[in-house]
């Protein structure tokens, strides 16, 4: 019987995002050539929250975009459902910026591989770094996050869900253990 464990509640997610902002500031200073790019869907929400806090602390705007990776997935044939195609919106010239790619959960690395491929179709940034709210391990590709909110040890067959109030009505991270 599956067991659901709350890994982080709304307040813990808020604190984690604030800590990540301070890590970004520590490494990036004034962030003058930093752009945030959220991976659809929940990565966009997390990136927007990070952007809001950064802009408040820095006193200047940061370029922001949304990246949909569904057309770049390598598992279309094994999915039980058709993925919902979102939109990509990158309203800035990538070559002028270091991009901080933001996602909710880092697992096998395949989503990030797809994101890098999608990003390449829109230009070549000066640098790409990765921020993941949750890192649950079990990589299949040599990909790691530069900024990690929380490491959650899991079994491969477990499932980690990040819910955000903007989409799901509440902020939470849950581990559904098999």
Image (cartoon, rainbow, N blue to C red):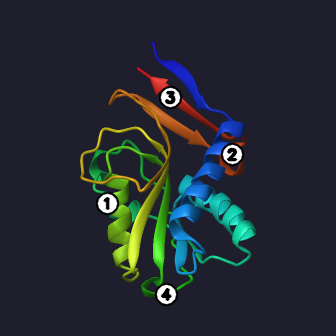
Q: Where is mark 4, residue-wise? A: 93
Say which quarter of the image contains residue 62: bottom right
Between 118 and 141, the one lying in front of the other is: 141
Q: Where is mark 1, residue-wise? A: 113
Real-space Cα separation, disc 2 to disc 4, in angstroms: 30 Å
Q: Residue at x 63, y 60 (%)?
A: 50
Q: Secondary structure at mark 2?
A: helix
N-terminal of the pair, mark 2 or mark 4, is 2
Q: Check disc 4: other Cα within 10 Å, few if <14, some if 14-19, many if 20+.
A: few
Real-space Cα separation, disc 3 to disc 4, in angstroms: 38 Å
Residue 153 image offset from top left, x and y in percent: 41, 30
Q: Is residue 175 left or right of residue 155?
A: right
Residue 97 visible within the image: yes
Rendered-image quadrant of the N terminus: top left
Residue 45 image offset from top left, x and y in percent: 62, 57
Q: Secondary structure at mark 4?
A: loop
Real-space Cα separation, disc 4 to disc 1, in angstroms: 21 Å
Tag 3 and tag 1, C-beta contact below 8 Å: no
Q: Check disc 3: other Cα within 10 Å, few if <14, some if 14-19, many if 20+.
A: many
Tag 3 and tag 4, C-beta contact below 8 Å: no
Q: Where is mark 2, residue-wise? A: 14
Q: Where is mark 3, residue-wise? A: 175
N-terminal of the pair, mark 4 or mark 1, is 4
N-terminal of the pair, mark 2 or mark 1, is 2
Q: Check disc 2: other Cα within 10 Å, few if <14, some if 14-19, many if 20+.
A: some
């Amino acid at each position: 019987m599956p067991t659901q464990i709350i890994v982080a509640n709304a307040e813990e997610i808020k604190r984690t995002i604030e800590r990540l902002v301070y890590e970004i500031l520590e490494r990036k200073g004034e962030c003058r050539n930093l752009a945030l790019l959220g991976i659809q869907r929940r990565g966009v929400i997390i990136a927007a929250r990070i952007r809001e806090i950064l802009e408040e602390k820095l006193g200047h705007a940061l370029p922001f975009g949304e990246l949909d990776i569904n057309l770049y997935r390598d598992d279309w044939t094994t999915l039980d459902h058709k993925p919902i195609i979102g939109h990509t919106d990158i309203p800035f010239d990538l070559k002028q910026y270091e991009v901080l790619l933001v996602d909710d959960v880092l697992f096998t690395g395949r989503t990030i591989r797809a994101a890098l491929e999608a990003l390449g179709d829109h230009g070549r940034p000066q640098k790409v770094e990765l921020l993941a709210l949750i890192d649950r391990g079990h990589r299949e590709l040599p990909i790691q996050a530069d900024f990690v909110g929380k490491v959650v040890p899991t079994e491969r067959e477990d499932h980690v869900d990040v819910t955000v109030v903007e989409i799901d009505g509440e902020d939470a991270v849950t581990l559904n253990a098999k």
